[in-house]
Amino acid sequence: LASIAAVSQIEITSRVKENERGVTIILKAGKFIEKKEVFCPIGTNIKVKNMFYNIPARKKFLKKDPTELGHITDIIERFGLAYPRIHFIYNHNELNILNCPGSKDLRTTVFHIYGKKVAKLMELVNYEESNIKLHGFVSV
């Protein structure tokens, strides 16, 4: 997140359930701009805008928008699988790309990321022996 913040404009809003209000922090090109208390839902929302606005030479080397969007989507999906109990909502230009509600059930997370067809094909693996634990899904 720090390297993304250095080349974009970021707004982070976060609230814990114990507090009535949360905090919004605004960063531009990695520099702190503003911090304010806000009313917001529980959780953390990260908005990234204007990637590479401050480094036009780097912006020229980006691939086409759909390619870059695919790379970002892949990363968000991996985070969803690595942290299945966290609710991930990923939007691009007001379009919902991924909505993966947090779940204790990994199959539910797989369903939200890859769809019903793929989730049905997955087989659960639970293996434990001495210092080795393996938990997840496999498919052919």
Image: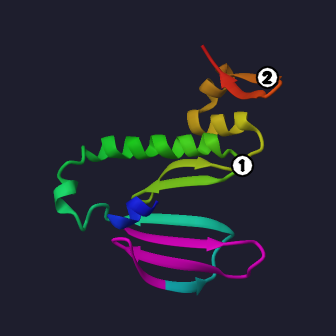
Badge count: 2
* Magenta stretch holds residue 23: yes
Q: CA distance from mark 1 to mark 2?
A: 21 Å
| Magenta span of residues | 9-34
Q: Amino acid at mark 2?
A: Tyr
Q: Which residue is at a point 46% across and 40% down the rendered structure image? A: 74
Query: What secondary structure characterizes most of the magenta part?
Result: strand
Query: Considering the numbered disc 2 on the image, is that residue within a helix, a strand or a loop?
Result: strand
Q: Position of residue 30 (x, y in %)?
A: 38, 71
Q: Is residue 63 left or right of residue 103?
A: left
* Magenta stretch holds residue 49: no
Which of the labelled discs sits on residue 127, or is there none? 2
Query: Considering the numbered disc 1 on the image, is that residue within a helix, a strand or a loop?
Result: loop
The answer to which quarter of the image holds residue 109 is top right
Q: Position of residue 125 (x, y in %)?
A: 75, 22
Q: Position of residue 66 (x, y in %)?
A: 32, 43
Mark 1 and mark 2 lie on one chain; the one further toward the N terminus is: 1
Residue 139 appearing in the image: yes
Give neighbour class at mark 2: few <14, some 14-19, many 20+ (Cα, 10 Å).
few
User: Quick one: which residue is furthest to the front in this view?
Assistant: 131
Quadrant of the frame with the C terminus: top right
The answer to which quarter of the image holds residue 50 is bottom left
Closer to the camera in the image, 59 or 87: 59
Q: Which residue is mark 1?
A: 85
Q: Are marks 1 and 2 in contact (CB under 8 Å)?
A: no
Q: Which residue is at a point 65% across and 46% down the rendered structure image? A: 83
Colour theme: rainbow
Give neighbour class at mark 1: few <14, some 14-19, many 20+ (Cα, 10 Å).
some
Q: Amino acid at mark 1?
A: Arg
Residue 8 appearing in the image: no
